């Protein structure tokens, strides 16, 4: 950690700070520049409160030299992590297609969609049973009944199931679920993350709407530091001033997360754009920039079929997209 | 709800949509404009999925005419809500000063700060026992021991206590706490909000870093719809591209929330700016634009005293600010 | 245009507004809903000040039904515009690779880079002569001398040249330039846009750091309304709270701009990311989501060669990327 | 300037960088930390391209220790600048109220408003003659005729006049204008800034919608480095995800700009909020946090009188606000 002092700080105040830092067991390397003094802190700085020091009126700024994330850091773990879900693999060159409806609505619906996405090349089935909704008056999901229907769909197709968990107290209901999804709004629900860290189930961790990459990695760290290394990161759009799109899909997060971490990174173009017509181009872009998978909404609802719209793709659209995705991946790898 | 159709939509597709809307029990008023057709939906539209309709390719846009928030809406409750905490009142002309350290550290610290802020005019004591931290390696708070120390400080000073709850499962530990705080990261932890709605304790609900005012009000609605009407809203800064400040304090939220809702609105200038020198001007600005209270960090730590810095104010700075705040409020009311 | 009135507006005030609107030559269609009244404005609403009406205290909100952009609107011009620059075409299926150094530095440099990018498949040469810099103390470009050097490079290679213009008064210097670039900071320099509209030269218009797609299209409209229809739109990253990346490349702008407008859309991954390692994945993603071209920084500087870094690609990196881009485009089109 | 090297950089590459830096006339102080090496650059680093160095793959990050802004920096000019406009002063304890209509519309309008705001305590008159509009089809202002009308209003009232300039080529028309305003969209129109720096007229420089405080100060630096020290900074709201407000007024910019710079800082609550009801609370907040003045829209239009709305205040509202502002300022100074 580097502490840049303000110019014209009294020797007495500077010594006060240095003594205080030394009292925390740190070595201090003082470098007197032409205009300003810089302190280099040597030793275990992980417990040093960077913001506290930065707020001191004798300090200009503070810079961490070593990262605060360890478990998910590629520096300490150069090889890609491969998360295994049954026979399905994600990461390290294994590309995973996850598809299914936004919400589980009925046995007929989920089984039919599961069969359709399997036929179109999907490796896992998604479907919401517990739904986080901005309004308390909106549909909150079928809950435990929804999980049972997902299991039926799995039994019919063999596809592992991915579904969102919103509260640690619901964990018993998810015992037989294959991948636990943490939604964007819960990315910093630290109590939930710690509990998921105590399971051995793969966790699909979505980036929050206004969270930085560092914060996403620190949330992965909460899970991993509690013992569970099976974390899949997911970029699903951030909140900006965007006018025509629900959120702004930040695809540059994909190569940057790959540089910073060894964890697999997937992309959710459906929630990012909120418009089905925008899903194929953004899914192809996600594949082109190196994502390890895509999670895409697919449904078979007649209203949507009637109107050719909605956030979800119809199964035949998904099948066509699926073929293009394979072609793009091949072009990037062999191109 | 108003649905603006795209131009050149076939009669057949438009009729399909109208029939589907009617099947949900709605009346439809069709208005054919020069270029486009507009459908007015009459009846209970609260269950209509606005985003689904907006995503249809025959629809240009959708606009809700009636608000989706009810309990906290000033339209249906014109008078200011006054939240009562023991003998302390917030809202409806009652201004409330909440002060205390970021974290409870020891009995000596919290009792000393409590006495100091009481002497300086504070009406309630704040202090973190459960601390949400971005990193799992950072100090997570004294937890239940911290709550016990807050109670000791309350016993010494008579000040009601405000402290953050991070998980519904911790509720039993908060039985004797006066005001439950929901932090910015948990603003959309809907399971927690619902549980707090089932208590009768006042809830201080902080706006999330990237949440709109509507989302803040919908989160208040989760608490109120579950039966608890004692909600205090808190503006604490939003995430922007700001370079010199941790967050951007959005003070225009204060008069706008007062227009939209009858709930009291307080301001937290300490977390928004992260710099103690910026706390007094922003606290005064908050009072000037009509906030119903201020929650400010105060500590008595010698390091800070030495260096004149940090996010927290020293007790004597808080006392001086407190006097100015009273003067500004008087100027605004009588000016 | 639709005006949604607040509930409980007095008949007298509502009639006042209607009379005022009628005085502007508009027809008014009044639709009384269950809770609120909606006015439909019929006729030429392009001169109606939407924000003024929205700010009236009897009005809840205002919605434009017809777009305010005309010349660049796909609704009125369904076919893709193809911009022609000498023998090079952009748009309508014609993909254009533009490459070159950030700044023109010397004859040797620009000629050498021009030859290298031509060999690697580029169709046009870029290079800054007038440089917009945040600081007045930074290098401001070689100016007219830089333009002369670009022409030399064009003479050597046959590549048309693209360079930024910052002030209308410099136009005479650009008489022999092929494509005039408007930088992000000048996207709403309306006087400059109008002047460029009076030329017949192709204009490469970059999206401003915090501008919406509608604002970008309105700026294109300034150029086109003045008579010049040769506009190329360019997405180059927007300003967000991003931590590891200079800006956030908003690739979803590409398919959305294609839906809204008939103009060609290209992507600049170099300025968006500011990191050469991130340029290839984001360039491939841009090609995958349908961009009509890519503008990429390439240089031949030994420092960069030594250190394998910087925002710019080396010629051999660009050549390798160029091949992958062709493969990805083929995969998307034929996949 | 401090350069933090990545860990595990080869000695050869590190020496290459050091040699290159030395070749630019800098002294280099190498500090080998436990994990990483830090280079301290000594000498004139103002010409060093920080982003270039940061982009090298052997470099972790770069930090400027000395600020790049000089003329406007409080470090080198501790006393407040007082800008003088005729007998009116701004800054250094002199509070300035600027008021008037958004656009100059007619002689009758501007003279009547000028008299009204003078009676209500305003010190200067504002009014737009050249109007930057997002759409080329919107009213672009009365231009030179508008400036003539402003002069008439000045002759009638003695109030100095403030009006926006959009292009350097219009400067001759502004010869007799008292304060030249640079709008938010032109904050980084560097050619315009340089030209204004060559005049000796006070410049009111508005912060751009998505510009940082550092960028605002660098734009002031463009004017000052060209010789004109009469710069007034203006906060007028930034672009965020805000739902109910046009922009987000960033009032914390006021105390922070005062800390960084000696220039006066004023606030524009009218453009920031876009809603007249929100102007008084935000104006009071601006005064409370230490602004040196307020620029507020006032008009006398009967439509607004009828409807009690719009962005502009009516003269009697402005007069009432004016008294409260004085009271708030007194409370802050004496409180």
Image: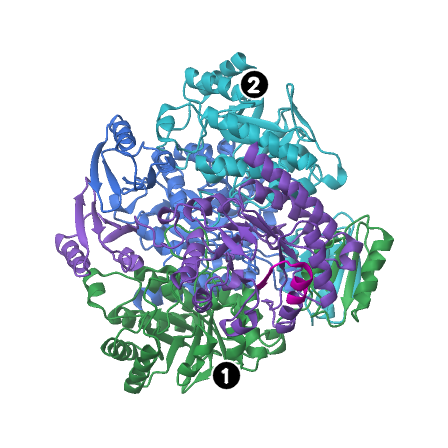
Chain colours: A cyan, B blue, C purple, D green
From this viewpoint, is residue C248 visible? yes
Chain where mark 2 sits: A
The number of discs equals: 2
- Looking at the picture, tell me which residue is in the foreground, A277 or C329: C329
Q: Residue at x 40, y 87 (%)?
A: D87
The circle on residue A209 is none
Answer whether residue B51 is magenta in the image. Answer: no
Position of residue A319 measured from the top left corner of the image (x, y, whole percent): 51, 25
Q: Which residue is mark 1?
A: D199
Q: Residue at x 79, y 69 (%)?
A: D26
Q: Which residue is mark 2?
A: A159
Are the residues at dot 1 and dot 2 in contact (C-beta closer than 8 Å)?
no
Kindly give the residue lying farthest to the top in the view shown. A156
- Looking at the picture, tell me which residue is in the foreground, C187 or D72: C187
Q: Which residues are magenta?
A: C151-163
- Looking at the picture, tell me which residue is in the foreground, C29 or C192: C192
Position of residue B248 measured from the top left corner of the image (x, y, whole percent): 49, 56
From this viewpoint, is residue B123 visible? no
Work out how far the residue at label 1 is from the one at label 2, CA to CA, in angstroms.
Answer: 73 Å
Quadrant holding the N terminus of chain D = bottom right
Q: Secondary structure at mark 1?
A: loop
- Looking at the picture, tell me which residue is in the foreground, B215 or B167: B215
Chain where mark 1 sits: D
Q: Secondary structure at mark 2?
A: loop
Q: Is residue D170 left or right of residue C89?
A: left
Please rate how many residues cluster around mark 2, counting C-alpha atoms within 10 Å: few if below 14, some from 14 to 19, many from 20: many
Quadrant holding the C terminus of chain D = bottom left
Position of residue A226 measured from the top left corner of the image (x, y, whole percent): 66, 31
Q: Residue at x 37, y 48 (%)?
A: B87
Position of residue C293 measured from the top left corner of the image (x, y, whole percent): 57, 49
Please rate how many residues cluster around mark 1, counting C-alpha atoms within 10 Å: few if below 14, some from 14 to 19, many from 20: some
């Amino acid at each position: 950690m580097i502490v840049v002092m303000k110019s014209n700080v009294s020797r007495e105040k500077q010594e006060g700070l240095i003594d205080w830092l030394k009292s925390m067991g740190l070595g201090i390397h003082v470098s007197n520049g032409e205009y300003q003094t810089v302190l280099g802190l040597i030793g275990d700085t992980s417990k040093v409160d960077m913001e506290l020091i930065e707020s001191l009126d004798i300090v200009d700024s503070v810079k961490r030299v070593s990262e605060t994330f360890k478990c998910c850091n590629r520096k300490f773990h150069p090889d890609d992590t491969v998360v295994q879900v049954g026979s399905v693999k994600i990461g390290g060159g294994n590309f995973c297609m996850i598809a299914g409806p936004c919400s589980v609505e009925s046995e007929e619906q989920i089984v039919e969609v599961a069969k359709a996405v399997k036929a179109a090349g999907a490796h896992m089935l998604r479907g919401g049973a517990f739904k986080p909704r901005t309004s308390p008056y909106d549909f909150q999901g079928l809950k435990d009944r929804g999980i049972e229907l997902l299991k039926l769909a799995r039994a019919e197709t063999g596809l592992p199931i991915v579904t969102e968990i919103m509260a640690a107290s619901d964990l018993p209901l998810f015992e037989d679920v294959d991948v636990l999804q943490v939604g964007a709004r819960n990315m910093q629900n630290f109590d939930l993350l710690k509990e998921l860290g105590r399971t051995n189930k793969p966790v699909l961790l979505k980036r929050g709407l206004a969270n930085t990459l560092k914060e996403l990695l620190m949330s992965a760290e909460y899970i991993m530091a509690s013992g569970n290394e099976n974390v899949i990161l997911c970029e699903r759009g951030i909140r900006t001033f965007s006018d025509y799109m629900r959120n702004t899909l930040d695809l540059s997060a994909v190569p940057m997360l790959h540089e910073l971490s060894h964890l697999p990174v997937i992309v959710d173009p459906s929630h990012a754009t909120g418009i089905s017509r925008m899903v194929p181009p953004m899914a192809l872009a996600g594949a082109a920039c190196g994502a390890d998978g895509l999670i895409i909404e697919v449904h078979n609802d007649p209203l949507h079929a009637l109107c050719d719209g909605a956030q979800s793709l119809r199964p035949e659209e998904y099948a066509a997209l699926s073929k293009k995705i394979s072609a793009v991946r091949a072009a990037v790898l062999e191109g």
